[in-house]
Amino acid sequence: MRWLLPNIISAFDNVYSGWILWNLFLAAIPLLLSFSLFRRQSLSNRWFLAACVLVGTIGVLGLGPRIPRAVQGLYNLLQDNSSPLSWFELLWLLAVTAFAGLLSLKIFKTKQDPQGWLWWVGLVVFLIFLPNAPYVLTDIIHLIRGTSSGQIRILVVALVFIPLHSAAILLGFEAYVVSILNLAAYLKQHGAKAMILPLELTIHALSAVGIYLGRFLRFNSWDLVTDPTGVIAYTLDALTSKQPAAVIFVTFVILASLYWVMKQITLGLKLRIRYARQGIDALD
């Protein structure tokens, strides 16, 4: 079995390059925001801080394999002295990053719903990053690429990558489900229960568009800030073209169906835990 560990490490270096941890990090961002914006009192400060530290650690580990590519891109941008637009894009990106960091710190420190401009900005950030959670469903292509490349042993695929894929997809999509449930609980608490179903369907539709833009056109959530005109143009083109519109519609159906199933399972587990705390046998 000594050969197993080197094969696993080699497979991750050549095929996966940290995608699992990075995508889980992106999926966890809207989850943390949902607790901060909609259900802040449901988590103690200790658990919330622990969750933030865990998500941050996952993000750092997932970013590691991408650092050389990011450094190379930054170097190429700095070398392009002939284009003032490149410098403007760099400064704009740094400003947006700094603002996002300050906003996150402010929101995470807020114990009550602020109900001000900061809360609304946090809501927009939440909606922008939310499609990253169900996006992990499309990462099954990494498993296909890994198994078809001939670089990974079948035993490694069966014992490591398939379970890892299943766990990553389940965790990412569960983050999507819990995020929307937190929003639904907030709406119910504020007397807007009738808006839950229409908002859920709207979120599924927007997420389907986001998944298409991310998987096929390779846009990221932050491109809405750094290149909003490009994102809007490609989105309008996708919605008015037959094939992209069909892909988005199928994705919407899949998201809505899986969300309904996972929602029932999540609420059922929550109810089962409540019964166990009250000493009630769920089989009675």
Image (tube, grey):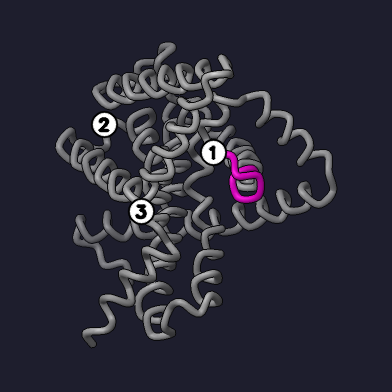
| Element type where label 1 sits in the image | loop
Residue 10 seen in the current view: yes
Of the pair 226 and 126, the residue shown nearer to us: 226
Mark 2, residue position: 41
Which residue appears farthest toward the bottom when viewing the image? 1
Q: State the image coordinates of residue 113 (x, y, percent, origin top left).
A: 34, 21
Question: Which residue was labeled with disc 3?
Answer: 21
Q: Amino acid at mark 3?
A: Leu
Q: Earlier in the sequence, mark 3 or mark 2?
A: 3
Vertical relation: 219 (above or below) 281 = above
Provide residue 155's location: percent of width, then percent of height: 38, 85
Residue numbers of the magenta segment: 213-220
Residue drawn at x 60%, y 58% as measured from the top left: 257
Q: CA distance from mark 1 to mark 2?
A: 31 Å
Q: Residues within 10 Å of mark 3 (few under 14, many from 20)?
A: many
| Label 2: which secondary element | helix
Determine whether the residue tagged by mark 3 lies in a helix, strand or loop: helix
